[in-house]
């Protein structure tokens, strides 16, 4: 499963500015959140979070190992998990996706 958001005006993947994406809509956020919140408990946690981290890593790097994934997961949680519960809420996910959409080209 690859994290891909499509802008409303394009069929191109919308994960950063080079694809014409300048903002993430609430519909985009809901779609991504529902994709990863497989059990419907309103947080992305445990295996769901591992899948999310892997898909984000696939967007920015093609050559990585399990240690890279764990470091990226810890960085993600350190920077975005505001309440430090080791889970990502919808508002925390919004921060991640906004940062990704504004990141420079890889």
Image: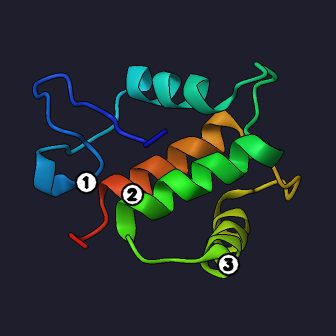
Closer to the camera: disc 3 or disc 1?
Answer: 3
Residue annotated with mark 3: 71
* CB within 8 Å, label 2 to label 1: yes
Q: Position of residue 74 (x, y in %)?
A: 72, 72
Residue 75 versus residue 54 in the image, above or below: below
Mark 2 → mark 1, Cα distance in angstroms: 6 Å
Mark 3 → mark 1, Cα distance in angstroms: 22 Å
* CB within 8 Å, label 3 to label 2: no
Q: Which mark is residue 100?
A: 2
Circle 1 sits in a helix, a strand or a loop, which is it? loop
Label 2: how many Cα within 10 Å (few below 14, some 14–19, many 20+):
some
Between 89 and 36, the residue placed more toward the observer is: 36
Circle 3 sits in a helix, a strand or a loop, which is it? helix
Residue annotated with mark 1: 16
Q: Is residue 39 left or right of residue 93?
A: right
Circle 2 sits in a helix, a strand or a loop, which is it? helix
In this picture the colour scheme is rainbow
Between 46 and 18, the residue placed more toward the observer is: 46
Between 19 and 24, the residue placed more toward the observer is: 19
Between discs 2 and 1, the one toward the N terminus: 1
Q: Is residue 95 left or right of residue 27?
A: right
Instruction: Write the residue at 59% across / 77% down.
Output: 65
Residue 17 versus residue 92 in the image, above or below: below
């Amino acid at each position: 499963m690859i994290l891909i958001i499509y802008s409303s005006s394009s069929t191109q993947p919308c994960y950063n500015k080079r694809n014409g994406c300048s903002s993430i809509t609430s519909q985009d956020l809901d779609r991504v959140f529902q994709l990863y919140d497989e059990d419907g408990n309103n947080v992305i946690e445990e295996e769901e979070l591992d899948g999310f981290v892997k898909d984000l890593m696939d967007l920015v790097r093609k050559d990585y190992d399990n240690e890279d994934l764990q470091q990226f997961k810890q960085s993600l949680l350190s920077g975005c998990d505001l309440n430090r519960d080791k889970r990502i809420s919808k508002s925390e996910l919004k921060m991640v996706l906004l940062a990704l959409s504004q990141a420079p080209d890889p």
